[in-house]
Image (tube, rainbow, N blue to C red):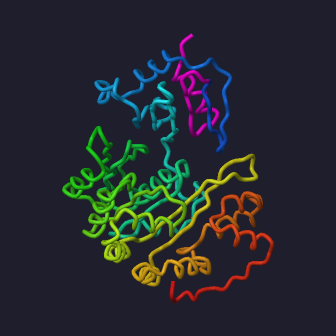
Amino acid sequence: MSFDLDDFLIKSHKAQASDIHINCHKIPSLRVNGEIYKISSNIITPQDIESILNKTLPKEYSKKIEDIQDIDYIYEIKGISRYRVNFCKDIYYGKFTFRAIPYYIKNLKELALPDYLKEYTNFNNGIVFVTGATGSGKSTTLASLIEIINQKDKKHIITIEDPVEFVYEDKKSIITQRSLDIDVKDFKTGIKYALRQDPDVMLVGEIRDKDTLLSAIEAAETGHLVFSTLHTNGTIPSINRLKGFIEESGQEAFMKRLANCIRGVVHQQLVPTTNNGLLAPATEILTFTPTVIDYIKEGKMEDLRILMQRSRQPNISTMNNSLFSLYQEKKITKETALEFSLEKVEMDQRLRGMYQESLIEDSIL
């Protein structure tokens, strides 16, 4: 019996799976609440893989189906869910990963994210980065921020994504959504032409290279509010990653330019809770206040790290602050707090009641 993709995705939707893995010569697997579960099913055959590819692949790619080795696109079952699909070759055979993208865009409260994040939607220009590992909820957070603007401001929002994930309904804003390979060649080209399309706000799916970074910064410098993502492990590492895109001889000038246009960096993780393993977000927030800007321009990254550790303001907060709050609220265990900490020595001291904190005066934050 051939594999019925739609039936399997509908059952996965009912199981609240975030990701579906379909590998040739293996049984399918689901990720539910962060853990992988193998499903009682027939082994996927090469014929099943070919059938799924023919069924789901957008017509724009069908002519080069034989040459595809790795590709991202969108598949949708109306009334159930949209899926971001990755197809790749796995030891010569095909493998699909379906990431569920809900129709409904949750707000910050529903996502259990800090209410402070909505402050980033009030800027008229600059760039905001949401960072984290694959599957940490970056796209969901960005969608929530874009939807805030959509609901409150009369603006033109352009998204450039690979591929388009959340689909927005125009409210006070109008929204143009473009997908790489189908609507636009690459992020750099997408930004170039977006600047000619009367934008106020831009969402650039990911900063992957120097050209995309410099194009996004140029957009931020010329009066546009830009949101984007990075795959990094913390707010300060994100700044160092951006610096690393630039040749060493130009890094000092670049950092001064960057400091003037970044509005904030948000790093997030999804951590297992004590509520049947459900996942909750833990966040690190670095808003570019005058003090932070000075530290970045002067290359005082250690001073910046200390500032973040001592701050107890919502605009500058470490991952440890977020994890420790979740622990105090009995939402996560000590072990989870320590496992996901980015500063494990400090977290261990907090958990043992040994941590001494000193506050930074509000005036410098």
Q: Is residue 172 visible?
A: no
In percent of width and height, residue 239 lies at 45, 68
Q: Is residue 347 above or below residue 332?
A: below
Does residue 30 appear left or right of residue 239 in this picture? Answer: right
Q: Which residues are magenta?
A: 1-26
Judged left or right of residue 85, residue 3 is: right
- Which residue is drawn at the image coordinates 56% and 28% (left, top)? 10
Residue in the picture at 49% in, 48% down: 105
Going 54% across and 64% down the picture, which residue do you hit? 234
Residue 26 % position (x, y)? 60, 24
Which residue is painted at 53% across and 18% down in the image?
A: 4
Estimate the x, y position of residue 25 in percent, counting from the top left.
Answer: 57, 21
Is residue 184 toward the left or the right of residue 311 in the image? left
**345 or 48, which lies in front?**
345
Quadrant location of the N terminus in the rendered image: top right
Q: Is residue 231 above or below residue 308?
A: above
Q: Which of 173 and 251 lies nearest the eye of the viewer?
A: 251
Residue 166 higher or lower than 240, as above or below: above
The answer to if 175 sits in the magenta stretch is no
Q: Nearer the viewer, residue 322 or 247?
A: 247
Q: Taking 247 as reference, is 315 above or below it?
A: below
Where residue 342 sits, quadrant-wise, is: bottom right
Question: Residue 32 sits in which quadrant?
Answer: top right
Residue 236 in the image: x percent, y percent?
50, 70
Depth order, front residue of 226/64: 64
